[in-house]
Image (spheres, helix red, strand yellow):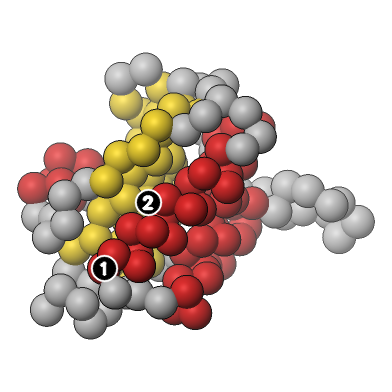
């Protein structure tokens, strides 16, 4: 899926939020996604997986990208797409964490919680995206 195609089919205009370039970025992103989903009529219980994945995507951009830039949220056809942009050119890698490791589980969580995820190069860096099924509000 290309970003322009997803935008043109969207039933909710893409919500774009600049991210701070510090450790508050995951919390700011979670709050924005929670508010966007609440505005669509989704309650907190139904979006816990999306909020956790939001934190992980932004944290990954903060720690492994070069600078988190912005978060985009789009809802269309019962599917929610998150995109986190950063200025890094490195490709995200899904790796098996050591059982003793306290970290390096972010993309494993995104992989487990989302229907699909990936990354795309873009002007100024890349974006990492994740898609979730949230049916029932735009049909």
Q: Residue at x 42, y 50 (%)?
A: 32
* Res. 105 visible in picture: yes
Q: Are marks 1 and 2 in contact (CB under 8 Å)?
A: no
* Res. 2 visible in picture: no
Give the quadrant of residue 74: bottom left
In-image side of 114 versus 95 (left or right): left
Q: Nearer the viewer, residue 57 or 43?
A: 43
Rendering coords of residue 9 (x, y %): 9, 55
Residue bearing mark 1: 40
Q: Residue at x 23, y 72 (%)?
A: 78
Q: Check the picture and name the quadrant holding the C terminus.
A: bottom left
- Which residue, as the protein is rendered here, is positioned at the far left? 8
- Which residue, as the protein is rendered here, is positioned at the far top? 124
Q: Nearer the viewer, residue 114 or 58?
A: 58
Rendering coords of residue 104 (x, y %): 73, 47
Q: Around disc 1, counting alpha carbons within 10 Å, would you say few (fewer than 14), some (14 to 19), or many (20 or more)? A: few
Distance Cα–Cα, label 1 vs label 2: 15 Å
The label number, if any, that marks residue 139 in the structure image? none
Q: Is residue 31 above or below residue 78?
A: above
Rendering coords of residue 108 (x, y %): 62, 57
Q: Nearer the viewer, residue 81 or 94?
A: 81
Q: Around disc 2, counting alpha carbons within 10 Å, would you say few (fewer than 14), some (14 to 19), or many (20 or more)? A: many
In-image side of 81 versus 108 (left or right): left
Rendering coords of residue 22 (x, y %): 62, 28
Residue bearing mark 2: 82
Q: Secondary structure at mark 1?
A: helix
Q: Residue at x 84, y 52 (%)?
A: 102
Q: Residue at x 35, y 67 (%)?
A: 38
């Amino acid at each position: 899926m290309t970003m322009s195609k997803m935008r043109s089919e969207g039933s909710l205009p893409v919500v774009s939020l600049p991210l701070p370039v510090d450790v508050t970025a995951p919390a700011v992103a979670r709050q924005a996604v929670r508010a966007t989903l609440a505005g669509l009529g989704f309650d907190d219980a139904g979006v816990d997986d999306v909020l956790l994945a939001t934190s992980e995507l932004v944290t990954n951009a903060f720690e492994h990208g070069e600078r988190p830039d912005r978060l985009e949220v789009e809802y269309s056809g019962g599917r929610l797409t998150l995109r986190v942009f950063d200025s890094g050119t490195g490709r995200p890698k899904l790796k098996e964490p050591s059982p003793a490791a306290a970290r390096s589980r972010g993309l494993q969580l995104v992989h487990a919680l989302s229907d699909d995820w990936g990354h795309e190069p873009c002007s100024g860096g890349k974006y990492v995206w994740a898609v979730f099924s949230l049916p029932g509000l735009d049909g």
